[in-house]
Image (cartoon, rainbow, N blue to C red):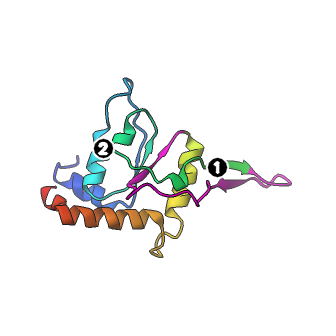
Amino acid sequence: CLESGDYPTLLGAADLGVCAHTSSSGLDLPMKVVDMFGCGLPVLAARYDVIHELVREDARFKGGSVTVGGARGKKKPVVRLPNRRRRAAKAPNGCLFGSPGELAAQLCGVLEGFGAGTSVAEEMRARMRGELEENGGRNRW
């Protein structure tokens, strides 16, 4: 059983959040995304009507896909990342996906260079945590 005080610690230890929540009414927003943002965690979230109210999408990763291909019976995943020349939204805090293939491509894209300090996820997380510190948000959690 997870104690309530451990929840922000658990989220804060993560590097990237994924939210597959969609709204049956199309009007409600997932509180788990709010929780993740409260810990400075960027999110990959399922795309639906009102999710843009929370997630400022990094459009550089919109529309990617992952397929299986290869010659002579050797099947390998082929990741197609979208056009990276698109401009990111002002201070993006995540990406939105509409299919499993798009989610997989976004995972590959935002985590590329992870551990070396060059991934988009690490950049988003550092900026989001800095914004929380500036606004006193870390103390509220």
In the picture provided, is 36 more to the left or to the right than 48?
left
The three-letter amino acid code for the residue at tag 1 is Val
Q: Write the residue at 61% across / 53% down.
A: 82
Question: Which one is in front, 91 or 65?
Answer: 91
Q: Is residue 77 magenta?
A: yes
In the picture provided, is 101 more to the left or to the right than 128?
right
First reached walking from the N terminus: tag 2 or tag 1: 2
Q: Write the residue at 38% across / 61% down.
A: 15
In the rendered image, the quadrant that contains the C terminus is bottom left
Q: Which mark is residue 32?
A: 2
Please give the residue where the numbered disc 1 appears in the rendered image.
66
Report how far apart the C-alphas of labels 2 and 1 lie in the structure.
Answer: 26 Å
Instruction: Give the image quarter of residue 32.
Output: top left
Badge 2 local density, few (<14 within 10 Å), some, or many (20+)?
some
Question: Which one is in front, 97 or 14?
Answer: 97
In magenta, the rendered stretch is: 69-98
The three-letter amino acid code for the residue at tag 2 is Lys
Kind of element beneath mark 2: helix
Query: Would you say the residues marked 2 and 1 are in contact, meaning their CB atoms lie under 8 Å apart?
Result: no
In the picture provided, is 38 more to the left or to the right than 81?
left
Q: Write the residue at 18% across / 49% down.
A: 3
Query: Where does residue 48 sit, x and y in percent of width and height?
Result: 44, 34
Q: Write the residue at 39% across / 41% down.
A: 52
Kind of element beneath mark 1: strand
Residue occupying the far right of the picture: 72
Q: Main secondary structure of the magenta part?
A: loop
Image height of 101 relative to 110, above or below: above
Q: Is residue 24 magenta?
A: no
Query: Where does residue 90 sit, x and y in percent of width and height?
Result: 39, 57
Query: Where does residue 139 sit, x and y in percent of width and height?
Result: 13, 61
